[in-house]
Amino acid sequence: MIAYGEFGKIIGRINKMMKFELQPEPEYFDEKVRKKGNEWLNKNPDVTDTNKYPDHWKFCKEDLAKEFNYLCAYSIIRIRSVDIDTVDHYLSKDNYREQTYEWRNYRYANPKINSRKRKHDNKILDPFEVEDDWFEIQLPDCQLIWTDNLPEDKKEKAELTIKKLKLNNAPDFLNYRQELYYEYIDGDISLNKLKREAPLIARAIIKEIYFKGLNFLQNRDYQKAIDQFTETIELDQEYIDAYFQRAICYYYLGEYNQAIEDYTKVIENQNNNITTYNNRGVCYFYNNQEQEAIKDFQTTIKFKQNNYLFYANLSICLEKMGYIKQAILNLKQAINLAQKNNKLDECNYFYDKIKKLEKL
Amino acid sequence: MLEKLNLKYVGPAPEFNVDFAQRLNVFTGDNGLGKSFLLEVAWRALTQTWINAPALPQKVRGEVPEINYHISNYDQPFTSKFKWQNYQWSKLKGNQQPIAGLVIYIGINQQFSVWDPARNYYDFAEENTDIPPSAYHFTSEQIWNGLKVNDGKSLCNGLIDDWVKWYDRKTIENNFNQLSNIIKILAPHQEDSWMKPGKPMRVNVNDVREIPTLILPYETIPVTEVSAGMKRILGIAYILIWSWLEHIEASELKNQETTNQIILLIDEVELHLHPQWQRAILPAILEVVKSLKEEIDIQILATTHSPLVLASLEPDFDESQDQLFLLDLEENNVTLKDIPFAKFGDINRWLSSDLFGLENPRSRQAEIVIKAAYDLMNPNKNMDNFPENLRTKEGIEKQFKKVLSADDRLWRIWEDYWEN
């Protein structure tokens, strides 16, 4: 009754790979790029051929590459040679003349993408608006697909972006991704190389291992599930969900110390994850660490005051430690909340429990 | 050099603008969108003459069709208007006509035209009763056998006679060496085995002329018998050297400097050429022209359907003086787009680029089957647009056997996908 683990469900973000963080413009930028460029634009108001615009942006190409970890912002594939034409104007020079020499308008991009973007401007998804979990690579075909996390109103834009930039076209990006993936599968390259070269593929490979673990967990094959989650963590130490699921497996195997260790790792990264506090509390309880268990349950109640389970869990701890009055108090609170949610079976169970405690 | 072209009510759209790059301008696009037309109008702007028939404008009530253009070193734009009364384009009179440089047109079917500022410009006509042709136009027959005018005078001896003449005088003149050298640059070769011009010979009892020969690795053959591709290369080599030699000659006669500008208009650069040669032709032409005179500026306007030609430009493409154009159909309007040059690397990627627009460089049938396979795997797509037999795993597999080669990676991907 007391075990409360939510398994088989992915929660939260996995890790940062596609989302890019804005970096402040380099110190020299204003003088070497913006001022020089705008001065030229002011002097030459009649020049419409954007090829003739002086390429002052070349000064910041190296910093731009760093901002994007040397990954093309659109295809998320590493670009080897940093060059002038890897500086992409997200809003085109033709339609947004005044944005030509602005740091915030630059994206690091494969020159091919650059030539395909033309004047589509903000009809194409801006790499900076893309959230980490909107897109993923599907294995084994390596197509870039959007996930259920992509907001409905961005779908049209996403479709156009993939189509116009040819992100799923066989001769270049798709082929290259497949090559890399199968080289990895055949043992010719390491996952680390894949992480550098095409992090989304690495992410997909790790996710696949993680999902195998989830399957084992759902079939209650805990040891095999633990092996998969451990492999996931070895490949990506920041894969927090794998710690969470592995902890559930340890719990079912009665290995509370290890479960507590994994839950603690989750809490370190997601300190408002109530489920994790609750689960860890449960493990502490069975591991005879009632003090710690109480602390965790108190935390869950602090975060979420209207869940009867947390009060019930707290009361069992108090009972075990001999604080019968407080235990009964918490059970009453649990009944209150359970009634509101029409959980009648639970209410009856708690009533019986109170009766038993009152006899002590 | 031609800097700008602005067309009103003539050509594929009501108004059309081209900003030319200084050196290379490469035009791609589907058939029938007006690539060749653009070259003909460029020729008209540069020479005041037409290669074939004058371009017929669109008939729009109340509008005057115009060809406007900028030529480098001239501040003002030039204009030619179409006069409906006499069905002609207006011409610039006398020295109002600009001089852009030596203009050479290389057409399909071995058709060539040359406009020489030292020979075809008006002032030469004024001082002579002999009015020279407004330009030299060669058919495929004339480029080989000579261009003669009605009164028996020869404007050009043709490739066969000149070649033999140059061969005979090769110890006292440099022309034959220059020709050999140009052929060597134009025709790709490995080490020593290239098409070397050989000793002329008689080939026909009914033709008293000696015919130039080419020494090929396997045999020596008269130039009249070589393949269409070699003929095209020889034609280009000859027209370049002939135009230049005659230009020097005429400039000396007129006691003036030779021009510093050559403008080449080339329709379908890759025509008749083997892929090996397509991959070399444009950079080679650039090299040849530079070998004619130091410090010469060359502008090329070329059309192509060949990804090999574009791939061949990758090493030397310079965005500050070269430009790629795409003629495209957008909602029934022909538009001209500047395409930023990107290095695609291999030919397949060029084929699938916007310039050629092939989704997948395979047969059309294979393209559809493969697209169906990928869309079936892709959760973001639905299969409504595919024919019934391509909407299922089994249906697609049946087609795979017809269109995929045995070692295609898609077999493995497909198997792995359905295993999961």
Image: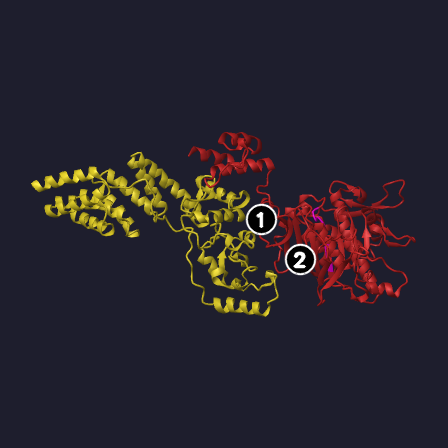
Chain colours: A yellow, B red
Is any atom of residue B109 visible in this view? Answer: yes
Q: Is residue B265 magenta?
A: yes
Element at badge 2? strand
Write down the chain letter for disc 2.
B
On residue B17, the disc is 2
Where is residue A337, by image quadrant? top left
The tag on residue A278 is: none
How many tags in the picture? Answer: 2
Q: Amino acid at mark 1?
A: Gly
Secondary structure of the residue carrying tag 1 is loop
In three-dimensional space, the C-alpha distance between marks 2 and 1, rounded to whole angstroms, equals 30 Å
For the residues bearing labels 2 and 1, Cβ distance under 8 angstroms? no
Mark 2 burial class by Cα count in 10 Å: few <14, some 14-19, many 20+? some
Residue type at tag 2: Asn
Q: Depth check: B2 or B66 in front?
A: B66
Q: Which mark, residue B345? A: 1
Closer to viewer: mark 2 or mark 1: 2
Magenta stretch containing residue B385, yes or no? no
Vertical relation: B183 (above or below) B386: below
- Residue at x 59%, y 39% (from the top left corner): B362
The mark that comes first in sequence, 2 or 1, is 2
Q: Position of residue A16 (x, y in %)?
A: 39, 51
Q: Residue at x 89, y 40 (%)?
A: B205
Look at the image and tell me in which quarter the N terminus of chain A lies: top left
Identify the chain of the residue marked 1, using the numbered disc in the image. B
Depth check: give the residue in front, B67 or A161. B67
Residue at (63%, 56%) from the top-left corner?
B323
Q: Which range is magenta?
A: B262-270
